[in-house]
Amino acid sequence: MDKFVIKGGRRLTGEVVISGAKNAAVAILPAVILSDEPCVIENVPTISDVNICLRILREMGAVIDELGNNTYRIDPTPIYSFCVPYETARKMRASYYFLGALLGKFNKARVSMPGGCPLGDRPIDQHLKAFSALGANYTLSQGMIDLTADKLCGNPIFFDVVTVGATMNAMLAAVKAEGLTVIENAAKEPHIVDLANFLNSMGANIMGAGTDVIKIRGVEKLRGTTYAVIPDQIEAGTFMAAIAATKGDAIIKNVIPKHLESITKKMEKIGVNIEQYDDSIRVWVDGPLVKANIKTAPHPGFPTDMQSQIATLLTLADGTSIITENIWDQRFGYVDELRRMGADITVNGKVALIEGTGKLMGAPVKACDLRAGAALIIAGLAASGVTEIEDIFHIERGYDCMEGKLRKLGADIEKVSIPDNKASAKNSGKAAV
Ligand code: EPU
């Protein structure tokens, strides 16, 4: 087990390069299964969720060559297994994308139910509704989801809630289904568009991704392609918050500024200066940070995955800020840890009230999920004294070499091994985000 040890109080300056998007990569890698030829995927982030995806593909029979420079050549043609067992599925919530990809390719799939997770209830009813609309039958037994279809046929799918995962899964299952599938109330996140672009580059016919109506005309075959995953919007947002929290001045490279709009607007309100270029931004603070109210919402609203990082920034601002979390029931798990660092935050249901104290103090803390971990890193960088963060395996699920990138920006952060007998017993078997 490892922990991060951060000596706070250093301004972040210089340049940082953002990696490929986790939430795009974990859908694009399973989507390779749909191809009848090998694919080359570039800009794949080095994170443990991606490692799990690659492991699942290998266990199914895919042949994967690492070409260096975050690029993988994946040959899905030898795949002989349609099953993702519990042992691997439980480690990554997004293992549900194997359902859509296997069903779309082989008309059958067997994937363990994704485990519980620290964000609250995470149903998959909308995923199953989409598969049923396309003609698949499902059974849930012994913790496994079995999908079978004689033939998949295009059909209308209307989602009762806006859901990223079910929108992506519906696209994966529909891409080779006979006829036209129309997905209404679809999610519009940048990773939805990225998956559609990837599938279209293999010969799929998907229109409207990025709007709330996606039309998919089924095709018989999909060919190999070379495709680069988009930059990670949330990693970029996390660095924006970290630079701002340390009153730093740095350039964030390899970003799509349009994807950052909702984050940029809020940060500017808080007093952060942001200058946008073609594929990079400069972030700096030269005045006081001020309160803001934030409500999380599906894209193009403020992303829930940036909620804890911006909350940390607001603990350093003047005035009282209100954060309303509208996507997940339990996304304030980081609050108790921030309180240990001197933050004044009160949570009532889905609303958090933050009294900006202008300062944080180092303390030993624990990450309870990926973005909570990111928030604690930001807090540690801005705090006086030393912060030690345990359970960093959560952070390594979704951030590519976070400590190395922060060190290049001037942070004093080290990854230190904790002897196994001292590591938190809570680590074993935790579910993924
Ligand atoms: N929902 C349902 N039924 C479903 C599916 C979702 O009611 O069948 C509800 C959920 O309970 C939630 C809302 O719909 O209240 C949105 O869930 P969504 O399906 O959009 O979330 P997800 O696909 O499971 C992805 C990201 C999350 C991110 C959310 C929202 C991946 C692998 N995960 O989850 O990312 O918070 O979208 O944007 O793409 C993270 O990266 O830290 C993370 C948790």
Image (tube, rainbow, N blue to C red):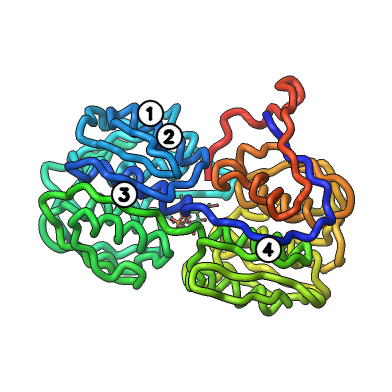
Q: Quadrant of the N terminus?
A: top right
| Residue 366, above or below 334 | above
Which residue was labeled with disc 1? 85
Q: Residue furthest top?
A: 421
Q: Which residue is mark 4?
A: 241
CA–CA distance between discs 2 and 3?
17 Å
Callout 1–callout 2 Cβ contact below 8 Å: yes
Question: What residue type is disc 2 on?
Answer: Ala
Q: Quick one: SS at disc 1?
A: loop
Label 4: state its secondary structure.
helix
Residue 70, given in percent of the width and then of the height, sits at: 44, 44
Between the C-alphas of marks 1 and 2, the distance is: 6 Å
**In the picture, residue 386 is in which quadrant?**
top right
Q: Which mark is residue 58?
A: none
Q: CA distance from mark 2 to mark 4?
A: 32 Å
Circle 2 or circle 3, nearest the eye: 2
Quote the CA–CA distance across marks 3 and 4: 37 Å
| 344 and 269: which is toward the camera | 269
Q: Which residue is mark 2?
A: 89
Q: Residues within 10 Å of mark 3 (few under 14, many from 20)?
A: many
Q: Which residue is mark 3?
A: 128
Secondary structure under badge 3?
helix
Q: Residue at x 60, y 63 (%)?
A: 252
Residue under the image location 39 percent in, 36 percent down = 66
Tell me if the residue at label 2 has its CB under 8 Å from ligand 1.
no
- Disc 3 residue: CB within 8 Å of ligand 1: yes
Q: Amino acid at mark 4?
A: Ala
How busy is the neighbourhood of tag 4: few (under 14 within 10 Å), some, or many (20 plus)?
many
* Amino acid at dot 3: Leu
Tell me the crowding category of disc 2: few under 14, some 14 to 19, or many 20 or more residues within 10 angstroms, Cα based.
many
Circle nearer the N terminus (2, 3): 2
First-in-chain label (1 vs 3): 1
